[in-house]
Image: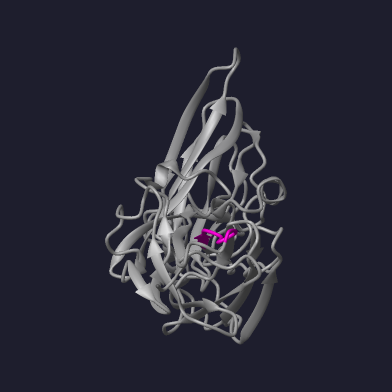
Amino acid sequence: MKLKQLFWSALLLAGCTTTDPDVVPGEEQGWPDQPELPVIGGHETFSIEGNEYEVNVMGDMQPRSPKFPSLQVKKGFLRGYVADLAGKPIKGAYIGARVTLVGGSYSGASAESDENGYYEINLPYGAVHYYATGYTIDYGTSRAVVGLTPADDNTSGFASETGMVKNFVQQSFGVGDKDEVLQQPGNPSNYYGGAISIDYQVDWDNNVPNYLPPDGEIEIDLIPEGKGYYGETKSFKVYKKIGYSRAMILNIPIGKYTIKAKLRGGEELQMKVVGPYANAYPKFGLKPAKAIGSASVLFTPSFQVTPGMVPAHRGNWQAVDIQLERVE
């Protein structure tokens, strides 16, 4: 009798077992353990010739991506996870996809990641391309909209009926679209790090005391004030021979820096914020806005851009424009 009761009880329990329809067999539940972040430290020196314009201080180095929970492709859906470099899920990241239809028209679809970093977009029929991947971070004492990078470094389109799994990462430096960088290496938005633009006037006729000497060389130091966004402590020195009246320092790991400017082997230079967005962000840029020899700098995001406006594979940083002059 007891054996019969146990048998029927087991059947009853088996019949009451439920399966979550959103869980695909074989997918991991929860985020895997993450490796330690690589150390980005030390010091590096660069030289820009008089006929050169820019320097990418992190070169081709790309941060390693975190480990993501596994997902299987779900037909008709774009889905995945969003995380920072340490593997912490990001809530509120914006992922936008544009679906091209017959006749050249298109339909947009988007989603924001949840508290587990997960997003899912039910796609209309057609060819899919990513049009926006953005997120708003805490930066300094304010907020900044930044771009996200695909974990597999690929934003090629796909057919909506086949579906796609795409994970995204928020990082503090690195190259965006490599083809865009080849075409526009001096465009700050092509990098996930910050940028500083150095401008000056040249005293070709030796009659303007505050202009820079044509045979001189500028010396710029960038020294982290504490650790960067992911613990970076690397410092940089850039020498620029005076020639073309501009230099662009690109792909600097996001953080707060002390910037020092002087003529090589000589006098300190005056730094002043210039450009159309000089006063657009009171909490970003050069502080103070006019200084001799040394100041602090926080990088500047593109002006009045929301997460839904950041193109895929872009960092969304614009250069902090600084004009250099001799002190009269």
Q: How many marks?
A: 0
Rendered view: 154 above or below 127: below
Name the residue nearer the viewer: 1 or 37: 37
Rendered view: 55 above or below 275: below
Magenta extent: 196-205
Q: Position of residue 120 (x, y in %)?
A: 47, 45
Q: Residue at x 60, y 25 (%)?
A: 126
Magenta segment: does it hold 176? no
Is residue 120 visible to us here?
A: yes
Question: Is 244 left, or right, of 314 in this rendering?
Answer: right
Q: Position of residue 312 (x, y in %)?
A: 55, 45
Is residue 20 visible to us here?
A: no
Q: Position of residue 226 (x, y in %)?
A: 42, 85
As drawn, which residue projects farthest toward the top? Answer: 103
Which corner quadrant holds the C terminus?
bottom left
Name the residue nearer the viewer: 97 or 236: 236
Q: Residue at x 44, y 60 (%)?
A: 320
Rendered view: 22 above or below 60: above
Chosen colour scheme = one colour
Q: Residue at x 38, y 55 (%)?
A: 114
Question: Is 248 left, or right, of 2 in this rendering?
Answer: right
Q: Position of residue 164 (x, y in %)?
A: 61, 43
Name the residue nearer the viewer: 81 or 249: 249
Which corner quadrant holds the N terminus?
bottom left
